[in-house]
Image (tube, rainbow, N blue to C red):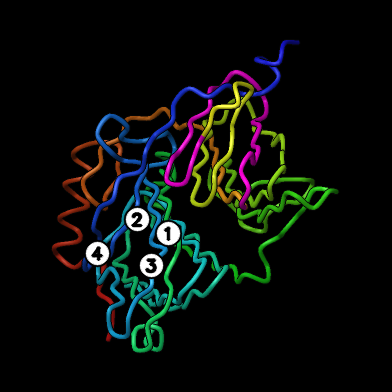
């Protein structure tokens, strides 16, 4: 088998754009952007920070609705409080993951933790939106909150590649998070000279997002740098990641089975028809999604 067929080729490199979200916090976003609106089943990827925040300057996303999809929050630095209309309340710190399945709908609040907001500090994290299949759009909301100490970690024998297994499997280690559809969500750190060939099922769409350093991807050794996402073709069963720089390379590798279903998105509502979107908006406006209690 030729090298080009043994590992997935690179089809596109996308530059993240900066945008404001919530109360005005800055994020880097590789999608959705003009010309690249989604990557089935993934709807959005936001990198929040890294940024040093003075005391009193941390911002968040006050009460807002979700219906029809999942949000995955992964915190590297800082502390965030999450509350919702279903009575859930939690706090995420460095290394923690929250996999929230909005399903039939919740009103959600994501704000900096009080002490972090008062003292300031470094904030860095990610949020991914994952579409739900039609059969699960109106399921009961649920949360999986996994503290940093329970996220499985694996390394290559030479120690040059380390991976946090948020969802899926890598280097023989499986995640503890249960996903509604097959998803891989892996945080790789490659030291200089590090290289790994990560299995990815051929029926998955796959992309990587570099948030520190530089490296090469695929059999073509396509160069990718900080703030860029690389999309892989579905032409093989693995992807190649390599650090060709002099500093550590950090990236997220995500893959999932595309739903290939009709989709209509209106802000925080992701449904299969326009009628369902209108109903979601009416349910939120009328209070049928509930309220966050003080």
In percent of width and height, residue 63 lies at: 25, 70
Q: Earlier in the sequence, mark 4 or mark 2?
A: 4
Kindly indicate whether the residue at mark 1 contacts the one at mark 2 (C-beta within 8 angstroms).
Answer: yes
Q: Earlier in the sequence, mark 4 or mark 1?
A: 4
| Residue 116 occupies quadrant | bottom left
The residue positioned 70% from the left and 16% from the top of the image is 3
Q: Is residue 12 magenta?
A: no
Give the mark toward the camera: 3 or 1. 3
Quarter of the figure that contains the N terminus: top right
The residue positioned 18% from the left and 40% from the top of the image is 275
Q: Furthest residue to the front?
A: 246
Q: Which residue is mark 1?
A: 140
Task: Give the spatial CA distance, label 2 vs label 1.
Answer: 6 Å
Does dot 4 land on a helix, a strand or a loop? loop
Q: Earlier in the sequence, mark 2 or mark 1?
A: 2
Does dot 1 land on a helix, a strand or a loop? loop
Task: Give the spatial CA distance, label 4 vs label 2.
Answer: 22 Å
Q: Which residue is mark 2?
A: 104
User: Relative to 204, does residue 227 appear above or below in the rendering?
Assistant: below
Q: Earlier in the sequence, mark 3 or mark 1?
A: 3
Does dot 2 land on a helix, a strand or a loop? loop
Which range of residues does the magenta coloring cover? 224-247
Give the mark toward the camera: 4 or 1. 4
The residue positioned 32% from the left and 56% from the top of the image is 27
Dot 2 alpha-carbon crowd within 10 angstroms: few under 14, some 14 to 19, many 20 or more = some
Q: Which residue is mark 4?
A: 22
Task: Give the spatial CA distance, label 3 vs label 1.
Answer: 35 Å
Q: Furthest residue to the top?
A: 1
Give the mark toward the camera: 4 or 2. 4
In percent of width and height, residue 283 lies at: 19, 58
């Amino acid at each position: 088998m030729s090298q080009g067929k043994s590992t997935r080729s690179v089809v596109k490199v996308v530059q993240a754009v900066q945008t404001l979200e919530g109360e005005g916090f800055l994020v880097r976003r590789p999608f959705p952007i003009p010309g690249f609106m989604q990557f089935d089943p993934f709807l959005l990827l936001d990198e929040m920070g890294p940024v040093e925040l003075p005391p009193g300057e941390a911002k968040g996303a006050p009460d807002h609705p979700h219906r029809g999809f999942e949000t995955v929050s992964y915190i590297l630095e800082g502390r965030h409080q999450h509350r919702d209309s279903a009575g859930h309340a939690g706090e995420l710190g460095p290394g923690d993951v929250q996999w929230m399945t909005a399903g039939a709908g919740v009103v959600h609040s994501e704000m900096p933790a009080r002490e972090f907001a008062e003292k300031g500090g470094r904030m860095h994290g990610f949020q991914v939106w994952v579409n739900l299949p039609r059969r699960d759009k109106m399921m009961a909301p649920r949360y999986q909150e996994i503290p940093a100490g329970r996220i499985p970690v694996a390394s290559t024998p030479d120690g040059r590649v380390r991976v946090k297994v948020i969802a899926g499997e890598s280097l023989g280690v499986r995640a503890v998070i249960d996903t509604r559809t097959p998803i891989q969500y892996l945080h790789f750190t490659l030291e200089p000279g590090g290289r790994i060939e990560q299995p990815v099922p051929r029926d998955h769409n796959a992309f990587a997002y570099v948030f520190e350093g530089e490296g090469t991807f695929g059999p073509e050794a396509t160069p990718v740098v900080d703030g860029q996402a690389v999309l892989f073709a579905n032409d093989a069963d693995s992807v190649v990641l390599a650090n060709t720089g002099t500093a550590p390379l950090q990236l997220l590798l995500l893959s999932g089975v595309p739903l290939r279903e009709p989709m209509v998105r209106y802000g925080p509502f992701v449904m299969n028809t326009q009628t369902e979107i209108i109903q979601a908006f009416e349910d939120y406006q009328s209070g049928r999604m509930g309220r966050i209690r003080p």
